[in-house]
Amino acid sequence: MNKYLDIAPEVAEALGEGRPVVALESTIISHGMPYPQNVETALNVEKILRENGAVPATIAIIGGRLKAGLTAEEIDYLGRTGSGVTKASRRDVPVLVAKKMDGATTVTTTMMIAAMAGIEIFATGGIGGVHRGAETTMDISADLEELAQTPVMVICAGAKSILDLGLTLEYLETKGVTVIGYGTKELPAFYTSRSGFGVDYELDTPEELAEAFHVKRELGLKGGMLVTNPIPEQYAMAPEVINAAIDQAVAESVEQGIRGKAATPFLLARVKELTGGDSLDSNIQLVYNNARLAAKTACALAALKRA
Ligand code: PSU
Ligand code: MN
């Protein structure tokens, strides 16, 4: 076992017995939503996973320890501290661990730590991708590279159009990442269920998702798998409203020269301000929706492994 990794006792016990476990990220807590809704949402997501038969493992780096499974106090700490916690991507891990620092894990680092712990299913809101204007900025999220190499299924609500969705799909194709639409043949655009871009495959049940992942593993194929789950229609935003807010936020980020790891948190916060909090409500609901699907998929995967 990895000497830098702490698996919470409940998580370790479930993994040891082949019971379903679902990983959750912590950048969504510290940098993705404001306090106190971030903590409230994180705790509710854990509850939803339990209600649907899976053990939650929220992932972070605390005092230089890689953590799979946090206490409510640790979640509260990350939520209160917000952007005061380092947003930890792959490149940050060695120094944060060596210096015994804290880090909120992105999709990238959550996948890394989940894989070290033996957790195969991970639920979140949205993934990073190829940013608009990446042809000159080269701003491409490390999340895409991680999906190409680390064997974890990421269940999200697609990608926000703060990104270039077409280029994001091209990049995933190049990297050999299977992109699945859950009950749809169209990539969901996070706040809305439709983006106009097609996905590779539509699968319609948690059992089908689990089977695809199981087969990938049995074939010895490396890398993860991306499941895009549309936001439930009653929580979706009007496309004109959300697209106008996103366009304005992107224009402001260019004007203000916001770059690097600051770009995504800036855009998320600005979109939330511009929509007067409506986007936050949608964001919370789509995370809950992804948690339900992830728990059911983890149950189906556990059953397949027992068979
Ligand atoms: N997209 C969201 N909410 C988020 C993020 C992305 O809708 O909270 C976070 C995730 O942690 C994701 C990270 O992994 O931002 C991507 O950051 P970057 O674009 O800097 O790679
Ligand atoms: Mn980036």
Image (cartoon, rainbow, N blue to C red):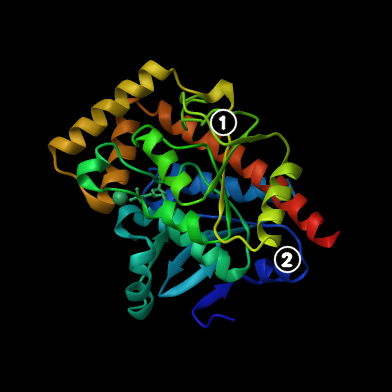
Residue 142 numbered mark, or none: none
Q: Decide which of 101, 210 is in the foreground and name it.
A: 210
- Identity, as a three-letter code, of the amino acid under mark 2: Ala
Badge 2 is on which residue?
14
Quadrant assignment for the C terminus = bottom right
SS at badge 1: loop
Residue 35 image point, x, y percent: 39, 45
Q: Decide which of 101, 200 is in the foreground and name it.
A: 200
Q: Quadrant of residue 136?
A: top left
* Residue depicted at 77% across the width and 50% down the height: 300
Please tell me whether residue 307 is drawn above or below residue 205 in the rendered image.
below
SS at badge 2: helix
* Residue depicted at 83% across the width and 61% down the height: 306
Q: Circle 1: is it few (<14), some (14-19), or many (20+) Cα within 10 Å?
A: many
* Residue depicted at 21% across the width and 48% down the height: 259
Please tell me whether residue 94 is drawn above or below residue 151 in the rendered image.
below
